[in-house]
Image (spheres, rainbow, N blue to C red):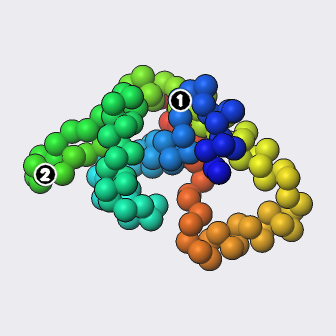
């Protein structure tokens, strides 16, 4: 269902809500592993690896072997993606505001409280750094 809501705005960039979530995490902290992201967002590790594999194939992320643990791959944003982030995140934020606009302020506050209680509320999308 979430993809149907996001598709009209983010589909033109060939991004899914999960892509935005993962890209946001990498803006916040480049060089994390798939297992870190899976734990952070409550995904199965195999699901996260599949998502990241698709993103790598689409050249959204780079996978670099961990210098200490050769089995682990560290994830990084590539330079072109860094240049596009501001536009992508602005679209995602506009869509989230549009969706939230369907609720009155009390309903919105209640939704945020419930999502936080269920621990499914992702952190807000960080603003890209100025040098991006």
Nearer to us in this view, 70 or 18? 18
Q: Which mark is residue 14?
A: 1
Q: Is 101 above or below relative to 90? A: below
3D distance between C-alphas at marks 2 and 1: 30 Å
Between tags 2 and 1, which lies in front?
1
- Total marks shown come to 2
Expressed as whole percent of the image width and height from the top left, the position of residue 69 reads: 12, 54
SS for tag 2? loop
SS for tag 1? loop
| Mark 2 or mark 1: whose residue is earlier in sequence | 1
Image-quadrant location for residue 4: top right
Expressed as whole percent of the image width and height from the top left, the position of residue 72 reads: 18, 51
Extreme-bottom residue of the structure: 117
Q: Is 132 above or below relative to 115? A: above
At 35% across and 43% down in the image, what residue appears? Answer: 52
Q: Is residue 98 left or right of residue 70?
A: right
At 89% across and 60% down in the image, what residue appears? Answer: 104
Nearer to us in this view, 14 or 67? 14
Nearer to us in this view, 18 or 128? 18
Q: Which mark is residue 127?
A: none
Q: Is residue 72 left or right of residue 59?
A: left
At 85% across and 58% down in the image, what residue appears? Answer: 103
Expressed as whole percent of the image width and height from the top left, the position of residue 17 reads: 56, 45
Residue 86 appearing in the image: no
Residue at the disc numbered 2: 71
Packing grade of label 1 (10 A; few <14, some 14-19, many >=20) is few
Q: Is 58 above or below relative to 111? A: above
Residue 109 appearing in the image: yes
> Are discs 2 and 1 less than 8 Å apart at CB?
no
Packing grade of label 2 (10 A; few <14, some 14-19, many >=20) is few
At 56% across and 59% down in the image, what residue appears? Answer: 122
């Amino acid at each position: 269902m979430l993809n149907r809501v996001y598709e009209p705005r983010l589909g033109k960039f060939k991004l899914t809500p999960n892509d935005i979530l993962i890209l946001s995490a990498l803006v916040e902290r480049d060089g994390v592993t798939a297992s870190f992201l899976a734990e952070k967002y409550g995904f199965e590790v195999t699901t996260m690896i599949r998502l990241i594999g698709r993103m790598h194939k689409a050249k959204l992320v780079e996978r670099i072997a961990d210098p200490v643990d050769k089995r682990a791959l560290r994830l990084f944003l590539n330079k072109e993606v860094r240049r596009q982030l501001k536009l992508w995140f602005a679209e995602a934020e506009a869509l989230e505001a549009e969706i939230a606009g369907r609720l009155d302020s009390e309903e919105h506050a209640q939704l945020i409280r419930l999502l936080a209680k269920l621990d499914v509320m992702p952190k807000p999308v960080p603003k890209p750094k100025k040098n991006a």
